[in-house]
Amino acid sequence: MRESGNTGAPRGASRAVGRAAGSGKGRGGAAVFAFRKPQRDIGELPAVGRVCLLSCVLFLASVFCGGAPAFCIASSQPFSGGLVASTERTFQLPQEKEAAVAAALAMTRLALMEQLAMELLLRSDVSFGGVGEAGESLDVLVLAYAVAAYSREISVDDAGGRVRATLRQTGDIGLEMLRKRLGRGDVLDLYTRAVAREIALIRAYRLLTAVSALLPNVSLAGEDAAYSRPRDFLSRLQRGMHALDRYFSLLPDLEGVWQNPHSVLEIMTEAISDDPSNPLLHNAYGEAALQAGRPHEALDAQSAALRLDPLFARAYHARGVVYLALNLPALAVADFSEALALAPKNPRYWNDRAAAWRVRENIPNMCADFYQACALGDCQGYRWATEEKFCR
């Protein structure tokens, strides 16, 4: 198999088009988002002209801002749609077709998101300026994945052994949508993890097909036992990309909770069957299971996610919520504490641990956690505790 056509996607895969950190307001009510200069390897750069333009912008920003540049939206004009990306893949045998389809779709999505990330950085009414101390960094590419809506077209030429995927951006991206997405750090973390996984799968697929190109007489789909491992690996990559595509399709419906948990359960059951090694799928299934009133399934799913990724703060928090629903507050406190050790700036984690302390009748710790959540911007629990005379 080989790649042809202009995918618009660079070969490497960090794709750090830019780095954003923190949000706030600049003068005149303009939204301000801090960015950091990306770290990239020259061998992984995309088309020369595009990268040169981006490098110039980031360099000038760093010069005039005296350090990390800031992203300022100076008007409420939406980011217009209309971006298009297309990728073509080839396959030799029918067994390779599904992998070619999945890879073409993943590569095209990445190419489209890179274009959108460039738009976020280079639009005429977007300017750079200093904002002071920056918070945690965010890849602009991740933000593009989080705000973009797109349609897709897949065409397969079985006779010619070709697959073409085309994605078109649909709708506009308004300032309020950007604010909304930037205000949900927990959801952006899911996008960050999903994007990293998609890039890793694309890398692996490119490597495997490159090996196939170097050994043209060896088919990745051959029946020879000596090549069963490459064949199996190709199948695993295809299933992993397909499962991740399903996950991406669900993420826009995550607004604090899953808007349709029963649909999430159905889709994630199929996705987990395709790729049981993806902790994001188990986490989504577990959260939806708890919403559907199935706490023991939720507990098993979150535990599976944590076995796969012991640094998954959201899964610790979700399992803590399950323990609290099962009236196991000590276990809930332990998991909330793990989540806070990994993500101490999430006020929801502080509030939920405070609730667990309340069940355990540890009022001083409850008040301390409610206060921490309030200091991070969510004072609902603290106000309740002071009104009820639990805390001062």
Image: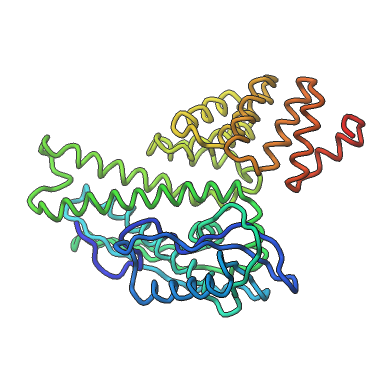
The x and y percentages for residue 51 are 39, 72
Report the quarter where the N terminus lies.
Answer: bottom left
Kindly give the residue lying farthest to the bottom in the view shown. 124
| In the image: residue 291, left or right of residue 36 | right
The residue depicted at 75 percent of the width and 25 percent of the height is 357
| In the image: residue 227, left or right of residue 196 | left
The residue depicted at 42 percent of the width and 59 percent of the height is 39
Report the quarter where the C terminus lies.
Answer: top right
Observer able to see residue 181: no
The residue depicted at 49 percent of the width and 30 percent of the height is 306
Closer to the camera, 288 or 25? Answer: 25
The x and y percentages for residue 332 are 65, 25
| In the image: residue 44, left or right of residue 363 | left
The x and y percentages for residue 123 are 55, 76
Observer able to see residue 160: yes
- Residue 143 vertical placement versus 234 (above, below): below
The x and y percentages for residue 107 are 36, 59
Total count of labels: 0
Closer to the camera, 347 or 304? Answer: 347
Quarter assignment of residue 49 = bottom left
